[in-house]
Image: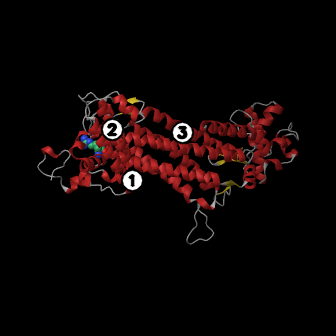
């Protein structure tokens, strides 16, 4: 039997393989709510414009509401033969209210319908990510404020560089995730145009009111070009690009958590709630949640890449290729959401091992720069010379296998005779971080101020 929706010119039904490759109902059923919302907005507009009668529109709206309830109750029977969510709903509508159902598709095509549904889904998803990023920012800033003064080693090249504070380290991620959140917000603003009424590609001869449907669906305006309206997938690409950057940030933090909670580093305690044990090694406590957050990045980048490649060769306007957009987004974006939730939980629960951090901060000659700066300040030598003097002192300490502050004043003087006792003040890691008062620097006061600024900002936003 040929398809009831479009089979007028077909003598035969589709091959089983055709049905298999063509049907999207197994995944696009996820769009049922958006599809029904879009259809209700559309038919109300048709009634207002006198394109369908109010009685017919009323019947259609009621039928759509019944279908919504059926889907939510799990009693709706989805059919692959009906391809996708749009035709599954329309066919059921016909069963429920008879031939009047056929009026719903006036001045509309599945092309603008799916573009509208998917935009609504992506928009809701972006709003959800926005909220989750806000929660993560709060968790990070709260933890940073509590540990604004906990000294830890700062690294470059994963080699001890200079002491920083744990709070400062976490606040770096606040800046990153805040940019992610602003990217998500930007994307939402740009995507919020309604494709509905673009029809198949050329618009329609019916006197539709696109402003009305746009408004009803919470869009800022109708998309200005019908060809673009049905064939644009920038909105999902941009969401996936933003998701990819955010996943990259999550993955970096996850990687640090994995490193930090290893026995060799022992920088943090991860809560039992976000760790697992080993079935053979009883001593193990593994940071599986962090590892999985790190791993999710792969599928999120994959989705972005798949979609970019899928779109790049498509002539205007709609091509069926675009049906492949959904599974990618349906996989990537909820996985990002899961990763954000897991990261927020981990941050809430983790505790730095402050003593270990302090100990580690002092090893590896982390205050060598402070010593060089002291030479510049007190001895008034050019920084390059100070660097050289300090390098020689570090060399001496390495030779003796001791820390810088364990060198005697005599040993120091043998390298630079003008060095005085005062130098020992800058060799402590606490004094080192306290001295980093430049804007954005790691001094505990700075960090506390930044954390408080963020917490106040987040609180004010919530009002
Ligand atoms: N299931 C289709 C999709 O997801 C709906 C649009 C079909 N349009 C068409 N002209 N065949 O893209």
Front residue of 44/295: it is 44
Where is residue 384 drawn, in percent x and y?
72, 33
Cβ of mark 1 under 8 A from ligand 1: no
Tell me which corner region of the image, top left, top right, bottom left or bottom right, holds residue 144: top right
| Quadrant of picture, ligand 1 | top left
In the image as oriented, which residue stretches furthest toward the front?
Answer: 55
Where is residue 295 drawn, in percent x and y?
49, 54
Tell me: 305 left or right of 101.
Answer: right
Tell me which corner region of the image, top left, top right, bottom left or bottom right, holds residue 208: top left
Q: Secondary structure at mark 2?
A: helix
Label 2: few (<14), some (14–19) or many (≥20) C-alpha neighbours in 10 Å: few
Front residue of 224/340: it is 224
Label 3: few (<14), some (14–19) or many (≥20) C-alpha neighbours in 10 Å: many
Q: What number is the disc on residue 72?
A: 1
How far apart marks 1 and 3 lie (CA) works out to 31 Å
Name the residue carrying label 2.
Answer: 312
Q: Is residue 192 above or below residue 347?
A: above
How far apart marks 3 and 2 lie (CA) works out to 27 Å
Q: Is residue 113 above or below residue 82?
A: above
For marks 3 and 2, the one nearer the N-term is: 3
The reply to whether residue 83 is in sight is: no
Q: Secondary structure at mark 1?
A: helix
């Amino acid at each position: 039997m040929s398809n009831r929706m479009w089979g007028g010119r077909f003598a035969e039904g589709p091959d089983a393989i055709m049905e298999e490759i063509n049907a999207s109902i197994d995944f696009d059923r996820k769009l049922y709510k958006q599809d029904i919302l879009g259809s209700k907005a559309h038919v109300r507009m048709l009634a207002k414009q006198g394109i369908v009668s109010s009685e017919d529109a009323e019947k259609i709206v009621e039928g759509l509401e019944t279908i919504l309830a059926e889907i939510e109750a799990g009693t709706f029977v989805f059919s692959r033969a009906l391809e996708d969510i749009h035709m599954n709903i329309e066919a059921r509508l016909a069963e429920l209210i008879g031939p009047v159902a056929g009026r719903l598709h006036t001045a509309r095509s599945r092309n603008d319908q799916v573009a509208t549904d998917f935009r609504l889904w992506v928009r809701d998803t972006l709003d959800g990510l926005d909220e989750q990023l806000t929660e993560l920012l709060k968790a990070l800033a709260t933890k940073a404020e509590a540990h604004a003064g906990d000294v830890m080693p700062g690294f470059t090249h994963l080699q001890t560089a200079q002491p920083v504070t744990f709070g400062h380290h976490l606040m770096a991620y606040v800046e990153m995730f805040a940019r992610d959140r602003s990217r998500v917000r930007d994307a939402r603003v740009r995507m919020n145009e309604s494709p509905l009424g673009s029809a198949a590609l050329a618009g329609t001869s019916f006197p539709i009111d696109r402003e009305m449907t746009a408004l009803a669906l919470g869009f800022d305006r109708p998309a200005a070009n019908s060809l673009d309206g049905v064939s644009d997938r920038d909105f999902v690409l941009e969401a996936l690009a933003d998701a990819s950057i955010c996943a990259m940030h999550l993955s970096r933090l996850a990687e640090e958590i994995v490193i930090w909670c290893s026995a060799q580093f022992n920088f943090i305690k991860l809560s039992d709630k976000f760790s697992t044990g080993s079935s053979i090694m009883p001593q193990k406590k593994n940071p599986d949640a962090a590892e999985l957050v790190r791993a999710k990045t792969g599928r999120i980048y994959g989705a972005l890449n798949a979609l970019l490649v899928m779109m790049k060769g498509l002539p205007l306007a709609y091509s069926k290729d675009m049906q492949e957009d959904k599974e990618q987004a349906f996989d990537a974006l909820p996985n990002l959401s899961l990763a954000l939730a897991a990261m927020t939980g981990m941050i809430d629960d983790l505790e730095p091992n402050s003593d270990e951090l302090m100990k580690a901060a002092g090893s590896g000659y982390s205050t060598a720069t402070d010593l060089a700066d002291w030479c510049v300040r007190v001895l008034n030598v050019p920084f390059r010379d100070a660097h050289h003097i300090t390098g020689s002192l570090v060399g001496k300490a390495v030779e003796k296998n001791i820390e810088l502050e364990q060198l005697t004043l005599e040993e120091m003087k043998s390298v630079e005779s003008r060095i005085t006792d005062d130098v020992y003040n800058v060799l402590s890691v606490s004094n080192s971080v306290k001295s980093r008062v430049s804007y954005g620097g790691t001094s505990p006061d700075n960090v506390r101020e930044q954390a408080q600024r963020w917490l106040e900002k987040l609180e004010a936003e919530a009002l």
